[in-house]
Image (cartoon, rainbow, N blue to C red):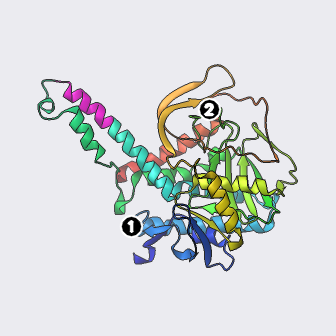
Amino acid sequence: MAEYKNQHYIPQSYFKLFSGDGRSIYVYNTESKEVKKKGIKNLCSESYFYSKEPILEKNNKPLEDESLEVIRKLVIERDMTKFNSKEYYIILRFLCFQYARTKKEKIDSEKVCDAIAKSMLKEIARKKLNDPKNAWSRKITMKSFNKYLEGCKIIPLGPGSSSIPHLLQMSAALLSPILIIDLKPLLLINKTELDFVFSDAPIILYNAFFYGKEPNRINCLASNGLQILCPLSPKVMLLLYDDKFYNFVGVEKGNLLVTNDSDIDSLNSLQFFSHFENIFFSNNSQLDNINALHSRLVDQIDTESIKESWVIFPSSFGQDMYMRGYSKTNINYELKLSFMILTSSPIWDGLYRSPMLIDEFDKKFSAFISELEPNL
C-alpha cells in the first residue's frame, strides 16, 4: 500500500517532457513569487490524493504510460498524419483525463457537490420549518439552520476516503474523448527564444470567439467555439479547435510555426489563469519573462472558476436559452494571436456542437453509473 501512497495529479512522465535533465524543473509560485528548482518526483502529488485504497493509483499507471508514450512520439515527430485512429484517441483521452484529475478540478467538483447538497437541504428545511405541525419549527429557525450549514462541507466519500465527486468527474473524463473527436487538431511549433510553460492545471479550455460577448456562457467539452490547449514541451503545443469559429493562417500539414514572442506570451498567459499554485518551466533564462508576464496579469486573475449564475446557451437561430446552475466560466483573458482569425458569421444551433456525440456520451456514462451503483 505504501508503494502507491504518493499519488500524482500530474504524472512525472509529463514533467519529463519539459525537464532538461529528466529529474528536475523550475517552479514559480504565484503567491510568494519565489522560484526554486525541484525534483519532479514529489511535484503535483499528495499522500493518498485519490484514495487510501491503492487500486485507483495503480490503475492510473498503465493509462499514464500509454498516453505519454504517444505524447512523446508527437513531440518528436511533430506530424499528426503519422498517428492512427487509436493513437489519436489516446491523445484525446489524455487531454480529458488530465484536465479532470488535477487538484484544482477536485476542489471545484467538491464545491459544486457541496453547493448543490446545501441548496437541497435548505429547500427541505424551508418546507419543514414552514409547517407549524412539524417539531422542527419549534426548535430550529431558518437562520440558525443556514448558519449551521455554512460551517459544514458536504462531500460524499467512497472507498479509502476517496472523493466521490472527483472520482465521478475522472470517470466521466475517461469516456469524454467522444465529446471532442469533432475538434480539429493543430500543432503549434515554437520558433522563438521563449519557451512554452505549464501550470499545475495544464489543460486549458478556452473560447476566444465568445470572450466578452457572453460573460456567463457555459464552457465545457461540448461547447460551441471551444478551444483546448495543452503544452507538450517547451517548443510544442497541441491546440484543438471548433473550425466553425476559427481559421489559422500559415498552417502546413497540421503544423503552424509561431515566430512572434507576443503570441508565446499570450498562450503562456492562459496558464496563469488556469493554475492553482505553481507555474513550471524548463530553463531559468525564462524567469524574467515569467515575472513580467505575471505582473501584467495578476490583477485580472480570478481564482474562483466555479460560479452560480444564469448560464447562457446562445444560438445563431432563434432565442438564447438560460439555465440557473453552476458553471465553469470562460477565462477572463482575451487571447489574441497574430495567426488566429475569428469567423465573422459562424452558423450553429442548439446547446452543443454535436447533439449526436452528447447522446453517445450519455449512453456510455449512464451504463457506467448503472454498473457502479451497487458498489456505492
Give the residues in magenta. Answer: 120-131
Q: Position of residue 292 (x, y in %)?
A: 67, 59
Q: Quickly name the residue at label 2.
A: 214
What label sits on residue 193 in the rendered view?
none
Comparing 205 with 51, the one in front is 205
Please give the name of the residue rendered at 15% of the width and 29% of the height, measured from the top-left corner. 137
Where is mark 1, residue-wise? 53
Give SS at disc 1.
Answer: loop
Provide residue 367's location: percent of width, then percent of height.
49, 45
Q: Does 90 sit left or right of 175 as displayed?
A: right
Question: Please, what secondary structure does the residue beneath circle 2 have?
Answer: loop
Residue at 51% of width from left, 74% of height from top?
42
**Residue drawn at x 49%, y 44% as measured from the top left:** 306
Relative horizontal placement of residue 91, taking residue 301 as reference (left or right): right
**Quarter of the picture holding the N terminus:** bottom left
Question: Closest to the observer: 186 or 300?
Answer: 300
Few, some or many C-alpha atoms within 10 Å of disc 2 (few <14, some 14-19, many ≥20)?
some
User: In this picture, is 84 found above or below 23?
Assistant: above
Mark 1 in CB contact with mark 2 (< 8 angstroms): no
Q: Is residue 220 magenta?
A: no
Alpha carbons under labels 1 and 2: distance apart: 43 Å
Q: Earlier in the sequence, mark 1 or mark 2?
A: 1
Q: Amino acid at mark 2?
A: Glu
Which image quarter: residue 347? top right
In front of the other: 356 or 103: 103
